[in-house]
Image (cartoon, rainbow, N blue to C red):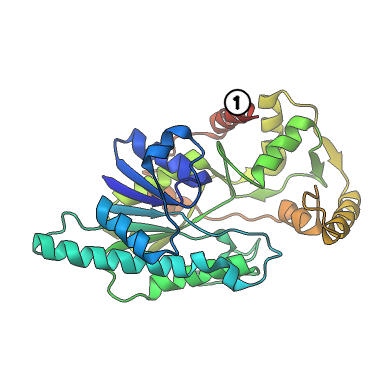
Amino acid sequence: MRILITGGSGFIGTNYLDYALSKGCEVINIDIKTPFKEEHHKYWKNCDIMDYQKLKSIIFEFQPEYIVHLAAKTGAHSITDLKEFAPNIQGVENLIKALIDYNELMGKRVNGIRDGFVKRVVFTSSLLVCKMGYTPKHDEDYMPTTAYGQSKVEGEKIVRNWQNLPFEWTIIRPISVWGPWMIEPYINFFRAIKQGWYFHIGHGHYKRSMGYVENIAHEIHSILLSPSEKVHKKTFYVGDPEPTDLHDFAELVREKMGAPKIHKMPMWIAKTVAKVGDMLKFLGWTNVPLTSFRLNNITTEYVFDLSPILEVCDGKLPYDRETAVEKTVEWFEKSR
């Protein structure tokens, strides 16, 4: 398999690139960022997906069979201008146009035989196409509350509405991803537990769907390998099938780290601290430990049905929760 990964220098991308290599695939990574891992540099092409001509040139040179599109502009909820997230919209359009041109050229080369064509593309969206805590009734039931979420809605619409695409496609929405090479917010979650300043807020037992990153890498690859009828023109939430109890998850991380006891913070105190955090952030402090937005994220429960992606993976994922935490803690300790 020849797989082109956009955004392969990022969190999910780093893990998926490792996974694809472990399966003997030929890979290339298109990203504007240098890879996290030194050994990934030889697979990296420095390219902005907004640069259509360069993107197209790399695709024609590498001649991929599959695309895993992970590249995206992320940003805080405070960014309200949709134009700031142009890579999530125009970038998707650029990729599709380049792939259409490539497939047309390859069709002329091989007289219609599909060898050499891009066969399937996985487009990565976000659970934030809907507000936190809302479970959509169908794939196009959108309810974004941020400019970032709206940009991902627009990206999905481009894929869904494009007529006669010459390749199969699937949209994925990763859920609360954590694991090796993670970034905010979960790297901060692990740091807080290690340093002893994480608190269980209120009762602490908030249920949510989450996803260990190496399991998500397996799910992405399973989509590439699955029969067309299982994945073509479908949208999957990707993550771990069993909902996570945030209290129990934090305690498991604490145990594996050998970290101090986690104390409880009554909700009224948490709300007061969050209000102070809001004020400090307004005054320019960028690393406020707790704000009202963050508190709402911690206490909002969201559980998605992940049985569809589990079926694509033949009912099993590589890592259980305890093993996943052990692997993440091992990476965390080495990266400090």
Q: Considering only vertical position in the picture, is 117 above or below 222?
A: below
- Quarter holding the C terminus is top right
Residue at the location (67% across, 32% down)?
A: 253
Residue furthest left in the image? 111
Q: Amino acid at mark 1?
A: Lys
Please name whichever residue, 66 or 225, is drawn nearer the observer in this view of the structure: 66
Classify residue 48 by image quadrant.
Answer: bottom left
Residue at the location (43% across, 32% down)?
A: 39
Q: SS class of the residue under badge 1?
A: helix
Report x, y in % for residue 188.
70, 41
Report x, y in % for residue 209.
59, 50
291 vs 27, left or right, is: right
Please name whichever residue, 255 or 177, is drawn nearer the observer in this view of the structure: 177
Q: Is residue 137 visible?
A: no
Q: Is residue 80 visible?
A: yes
- Quarter holding the N terminus is top left
Classify residue 115 by image quadrant.
Answer: bottom left
Classify residue 144 by image quadrant.
Answer: bottom right
276 vs 228, left or right, is: right
Tally of numbered tags? 1
Report x, y in % for residue 259.
75, 26
Q: Which residue is mark 1?
A: 334
Report x, y in % for residue 134.
63, 64
Residue at the location (60% across, 26% down)?
A: 334
